[in-house]
Image: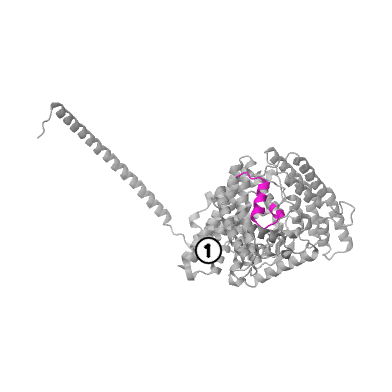
Amino acid sequence: MKHVTKNTQQRYHTFKEKRKVIGLQNKYFMKKIVLKLALILLTVTVFISCKKEKNSKVYTETEMLSESKKVNDFFQKSFDYQVNLSPEFQTRLGIKKDYGKLNDNSPEADQRDLEIDKKELEWLTDSVNVEALSKNALLSYKLFKLQKENNIANYKYRLHNYPVNQMHGAQSGKPAFMINMHQIDDVKDAEAYVSRLNAFNKFFSQLVDNLKTREAARILPPKFVYDKVIQDSENILVGQPFDATGMQSTLLKDFMKKVNKLDLDDVTKSSLEAEAKDALLTSVKPAYEGLISFMKAQKKRANTEDGAWKFPDGKAFYNMALKKTTTTDLTADEIHEIGLSEVARIHEEMDAIKNQVGFEGILQDFFQFMKTDKQFYYTADKAGKDAYLKEAVHLIDSMKTRLDEIFITKPKADIIVKAVEPFREKSAGKAFYNRPAADGSRPGVYYANLYDMQSMPTYQMEALAYHEGIPGHHMQLAIQQELQEIPKFRKFGGYTAYTEGWGLYSEFIPKEMGFYADPYSDFGRLAMELWRACRLVVDTGIHSKKWTREEGIKYYTDNTPNNELDAVKMVERHIVMPSQATAYKIGMLKILELRKKAKDALGAKFDIRDFHEVVISHGAIPLDVLENFVDDYIASKN
């Protein structure tokens, strides 16, 4: 045994005493810990058992039908209330209740809508037993609730837009509404048309007040917007009764064309014409003159700053806009990089077509060839424009005969092709779609803008017709309106990434069906997809990276076969509609991703018709909700 000194013995005994004390303390603390753990376990057990007890309630079919009916009745009541507040929406739905009125365009209307959203959200939160809803009613509940939450959260950004611009606004929108939406079936309808003309002055006065409010908040359009809005406005004031020329003005021509189709005596027709002329002179003319005067004055105070970054809290606004548009959490930088990657991929595919047709030179040389060679363009005269429209109809009719190969459900509503009206063709986009009337009284319309035939090459005709018509927007939007199992707010609502993603995906589907047989036409399909990929780059470039208008235009002209006018229009569209153009490619990529997911999972069980039925049979939905439906489809087949 080792020798132990006295000091060592003292330290040893001291250590033993300390260890004894520590041991007692540990026992004490361990008892406390055990007691706490027991209490926690008991609490968790009680909570779980309560939760199980709560969730263990099995609702009868009657209870679920009752709760689902309650919430669907609420959605219908809400929709009817909104329709009642909007005479113009009533007209779009084929309702002639307030046929002689225009919408309320005041700040008070915005505040009223906010209060409605708050009350409806409160009802949803407090009055619905979510667990007792059917699957379809639950989806409607979630979508409606999300819509209200977004409306309330984004109210602070209600001024972050340009109420008049080259893309839309009352200066062109109101005449287009009167021409395309206001039907005249009898004298009463004609008098309602005149009543609406008499409402122009008040509406435009509210519009100018709204523009002043935005200017006070430091929100003004960039300089390029003004001349376009002014020109569109001045176009409406050309012709009788505004001047002594032999031609009728746009609105008078439309009014008399509709009136002359009625079985009326000459005295009645003359009386109606006199009323319309009076309304045009005493309401429409001062309305437009007031807007023109204001825009000319404000133009002197405007600058050339283009991006949303210039708005108050502009970065947060743009991030919100991207989230709303894409229904994803992708950042501006991520979207920018996706765009760059897609541009590079599509360039490679285009290069392969260039080689296929035996063109010598680099891709940019091929772009120049496609821009300038006359074989790819109709003439700019009436014969050329008529030929373009005739071919567009043929393309859509040909696709109609093949729909059974890829779809189960087809739309009941028909589609027609029209040229954009002269009064707005210079500033309007190259193509767009108007959905049919819900009551079947008006077909869907594919509008082709034939103002500049150099912007409408023949090699893009197929992709454009498929996107705007069939199997694109007409297919999806007409079916959405015709669905029976969803509330009306879903029938007439939308999510841009879904709707435009489907439109772009619809340009690709015909490729798999054997269309685009001409390599130049297939090049046109790629050119259209490339255009949407560039949008990801340029939209985020302008609004997040502070690119100028000129930098955006150069990116398009350097990387696409489109002419400079196309590039100018597109960049100016980016500027006045932040984030909107990012929807197309993000939506298409998601649909393709989900299709691949389903094909990989199902193998031989995969049916393209079933997949398309899943995608379009629920109406427009956020992309994450679409993924849930595809997952359910996969599970149901396994």
Left or right relative to 84: residue 36: left
What kind of colouring is applied to the model shown? one colour
Asked if residue 563 lies in the magenta stretch, the reply is yes
Identify the residue at the far top of this view: 7
Identify the residue at the far left of this view: 1
Q: Position of residue 123 (x, y in %)?
A: 56, 49
Closest to the observer, 463 or 141: 463
Q: Which residues are magenta?
A: 545-567
Left or right relative to 409: residue 370: right
At label 1, counting other C-alpha atoms closer than 10 Å, the crowd grade (few under 14, some 14-19, many 20 or more) is: some
* Residue in the image at 46% along x and 59% along y: 59
Label 1 element class: helix
User: Which quadrant of the view contains residue 518?
Assistant: bottom right
Asked if residue 440 lies in the magenta stretch, the reply is no
Q: Can residue 134 be seen in this snapshot? A: no
Left or right relative to 49: residue 435: right
Closest to the observer, 625 or 428: 428
Closest to the observer, 152 or 4: 4
Q: Main secondary structure of the magenta part?
A: helix
Q: Is residue 90 above or below residue 551?
A: below
Q: Position of residue 103 (x, y in %)?
A: 72, 50
Q: Can residue 462 be seen in this snapshot? A: yes
Q: Position of residue 172 (x, y in %)?
A: 75, 52
* Quarter of the image that includes the N terminus: top left
Q: Position of residue 610 (x, y in %)?
A: 54, 68
Q: State the count of labels.
A: 1
User: Which quadrant of the view contains residue 404?
Assistant: bottom right
Name the residue carrying label 1.
595
* Quarter of the image that includes the C terminus: bottom left
The type of residue carrying mark 1 is Arg
